[in-house]
């Protein structure tokens, strides 16, 4: 998993020693090691694993989820850290339900369903160790995505993917191909789904900490199997993924996994209109753990420096 490798001071200005694009705007500093960004009608939800990620795999309370308004002009509102018997530890990936305002977060060894009735939040958790305690390392959940009623989760330490129904009433299982073999990834950290010409796909990004990570596209069958893998890139460390129209945005941490812009870290942009999904460009930046496009602006969580950046796409 990622650890904070450098730290810059955090006033609202372009900071000497931190690598940002010339037109980057540092829009909030009230965060602690932000991991994932989720755009919703209510605003931007941002997970915070805290303390540079040094204890992000432990069941020690402290991490939280912040809600920021769309133009990021107000201070974040913090969601409850403990509610309805559910304790947040170090939440990471976020995804919104396909047909409701419910959001889901992976948090160490649990999947947390977060609902809002217009006035109050409600939390429900699913114990991910139920998938197979003999095989599952609960410390490694990293990201998730959803297709229809099925949630797919990146299990970092087991180097596999997990799936379960969003109603939490059916047991979670490992993702397989059509032959029943586990789909193996090289420390998967980022997931995103999209539909093209009636077919469902998932992009998976690896984060092994060396140059062997892959960015892979899978076709997803109606029963949730992964088939026809296509490796788009196979050199580096790939974190948060986001699809906007015909482009795939990827938080790239360089070949060494340091997240240092001097090592090539930044937001990569891939062209989804081409069958080979070529890389178009890389916007150099430190520690891009996740990315979203909001009001035609590129919004990036800077994991290393605990800020949210906004710039032109």
Image (cartoon, rainbow, N blue to C red):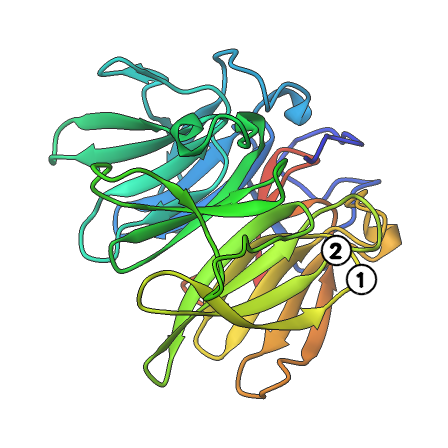
Mark identifier at residue 282: none
Residue for badge 1: 235
Q: Which residue is at a point 36% across and 40% down the rendered structure image?
A: 172
User: Relative to 99, is 33 on the left or the right?
Assistant: right
Q: Which residue is at a point 63% across and 44% down the rendered structure image?
A: 159
Mark identifier at residue 213: 2
Q: CA distance from mark 2 to mark 1?
A: 6 Å
Q: Residues within 10 Å of mark 2 (few under 14, many from 20)?
A: many
Of 191 and 231, the residue lying toward us: 231
Q: Mark 2 vs mark 1: which is more N-terminal?
A: 2
Image position, residue 84 (x, y; %): 22, 16
Tell me the element at label 1: loop
User: Relative to 199, is 300 on the left or the right?
Assistant: right
Q: How many marks?
A: 2
Image position, residue 260 (x, y; %): 82, 46
Of 212 and 158, the residue lying toward us: 158
Image position, residue 66 (x, y; %): 41, 31
Q: Which residue is at a point 48% across and 56% down the rendered structure image?
A: 176
Q: Is residue 60 visible?
A: yes
Position of the N terminus, as image quadrant, is top right
Marks 2 and 1 in Cβ contact (< 8 Å): yes
Image position, residue 75 (x, y; %): 42, 32
The answer to which image quadrant residue 298 occupies is: bottom right
């Amino acid at each position: 998993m990622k650890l904070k490798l450098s730290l810059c001071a955090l006033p609202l200005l372009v900071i000497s020693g931190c690598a940002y694009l010339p037109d980057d705007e540092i829009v909030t500093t009230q965060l602690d090691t932000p991991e994932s960004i989720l755009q919703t009608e209510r605003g931007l939800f941002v997970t915070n694993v805290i303390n540079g990620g040094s204890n992000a795999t432990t069941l020690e309370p402290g991490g939280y989820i912040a809600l920021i308004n769309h133009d990021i002009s107000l201070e974040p509102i913090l969601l409850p850290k403990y509610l309805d018997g559910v304790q947040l530890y170090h939440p990471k990936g976020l995804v919104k339900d396909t047909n409701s305002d419910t959001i889901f977060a992976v948090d160490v060894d649990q999947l947390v369903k977060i609902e809002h009735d217009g006035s109050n939040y409600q939390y429900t958790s699913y114990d991910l160790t139920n998938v197979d305690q003999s095989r599952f390392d609960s410390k490694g959940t990293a990201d998730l995505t959803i297709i229809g009623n099925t949630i797919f989760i990146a299990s970092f330490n087991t180097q596999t993917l997990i799936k379960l129904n969003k109603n939490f009433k059916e047991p979670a299982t490992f993702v397989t191909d059509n032959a029943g073999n586990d789909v193996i990834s090289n420390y998967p950290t980022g997931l995103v789904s999209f539909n093209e010409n009636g077919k469902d796909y998932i992009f998976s990004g690896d984060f092994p900490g060396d140059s062997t990570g892959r960015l892979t596209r899978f076709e997803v069958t109606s029963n949730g199997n992964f088939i026809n893998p296509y490796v788009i890139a196979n050199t580096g460390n790939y974190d948060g993924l986001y699809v906007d129209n015909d482009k795939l945005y990827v938080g790239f941490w360089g070949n060494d996994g340091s997240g240092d812009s001097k090592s090539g870290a930044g937001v990569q942009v891939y062209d989804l209109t081409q069958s080979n999904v070529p890389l178009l460009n890389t916007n150099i930046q430190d520690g891009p753990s996740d990315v979203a496009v909001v009001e035609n602006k590129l919004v990036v969580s800077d994991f290393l420096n605990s800020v949210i950046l906004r710039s032109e796409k």
